[in-house]
Amino acid sequence: MKKILLIDQQLTNSLHLCQQMESMGYEIHIVDNGFNALVELERHEFEVILLDYNVPKMDSFWLLMAKHCQTPVIVLANNNVDQERINAFEQGADDYIAAPFNVKELLLRVNVLRRRSEKVVHQSDFDDILFEDVNNTVMLNTQHLKLTQTEYRLFKYLFQRKGEVVTKAELQMRVLHKELGEFDRNLDMHISNTRRKMAKKSLPRELINTVRGKGYCFSPILI
């Protein structure tokens, strides 16, 4: 039976959702915090992780997910707020769905992510990365990632500093050529858009890691 991991503090509110998914052939494992979620991930192989956006203290969960786990994550939110959606993608979510939602739509999204993960290029396939400055394209073996000029420059800058944490202030100044404002989200939007384009090409999300409170890091493990 296909398994889904649900992380939700309000367990009683999840019962109806679980019953619906179970009636459609899924086995649901429910936990209420990041630590227990990681324990479950060690014990079982899941199709997808469903994460309630309001579960607190999840920074360690996202960090370990980015480094060690390929299981897709769908964030479940109470409302469709732009900032929440951006934060979810920045932390590493593969998809985001706001309440109220139809459970059939949720499971369709689960199936899309499952098919996508089956096609993900394995780490050993990343022997080389080539950059085409003329048309802002990154070539990862047979994969061609077409980016905007700013996305391309950010990707290339992070690649050249792979394995290092590059602060948002440095990226803002070196690539966007302006100082980072207190409420400036342009940089985060460019990174979020790049990750969505990577996902469409079945490229692993951990190529560009978010280091909470510091900046971004290009993973040297995958190349």
Image (cartoon, rainbow, N blue to C red):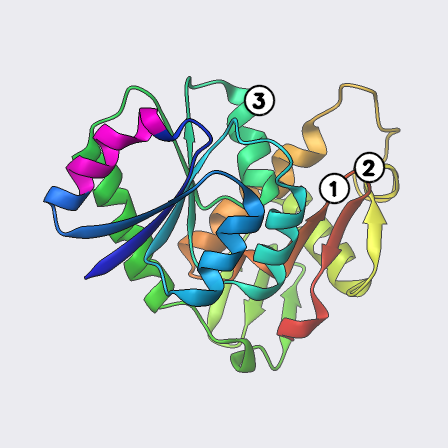
The amino acid type of the residue labelled 3 equals: Gln
Of the two numbered discs 2 and 1 on the same chain, state the one appearing first in sequence.
2
Q: To which quarter of the image does residue 219 belong?
A: bottom right
Q: Which residue is mark 2?
A: 172
The x, y position of residue 7, in whole percent, is 44, 40
Q: Main secondary structure of the magenta part?
A: helix
Q: Residue at x 49, y 18 (%)?
A: 81
Mark 2 or mark 3, earlier in chain:
3
Viewer-nearest of labels 1 and 3? 1
Q: Nearer the viewer, residue 114 or 55?
A: 55
Badge 1 crowding class, 10 Å Cα cut-off, few under 14, some 14 to 19, many 20 or more, is few
The amino acid sitting under disc 1 is: Arg
Left or right: where does residue 204 sit relative to residue 128? left
Give the numbered dot on residue 55.
none
For label 1, the SS is: loop
What segment carries the magenta color? 12-21
Vertical comparison of 68 with 177: above or below:
below
Distance CA(mark 1)–CA(mark 3):
16 Å
Mark 2–mark 1 Cα distance, whole angstroms, equals 16 Å
Q: Is residue 176 magenta?
A: no
Task: Judge depth for marks 2 and 1 and give the one in front.
Answer: 1
Residue drawn at the location 31% of the way across and 30% of the way down = 14
Is 13 inside the magenta-drawn segment?
yes
Question: Which residue is tagged 1?
Answer: 212
Tag on residue 83? 3
Name the residue at 71% across, 35% down: 187
Task: Return the x and y of residue 127 as percentages of the image width and height.
Answer: 61, 82
Residue at 82%, 42% (x, y): give it.
214
Please name whichever residue, 199 or 210, is drawn nearer the observer in this view of the structure: 210
Question: What distance separates the C-alpha of mark 2 from that of mark 3?
Answer: 19 Å
The answer to whether 65 is drawn above or below residue 100 in the figure is below
Amino acid type indicated by mark 2: Gln
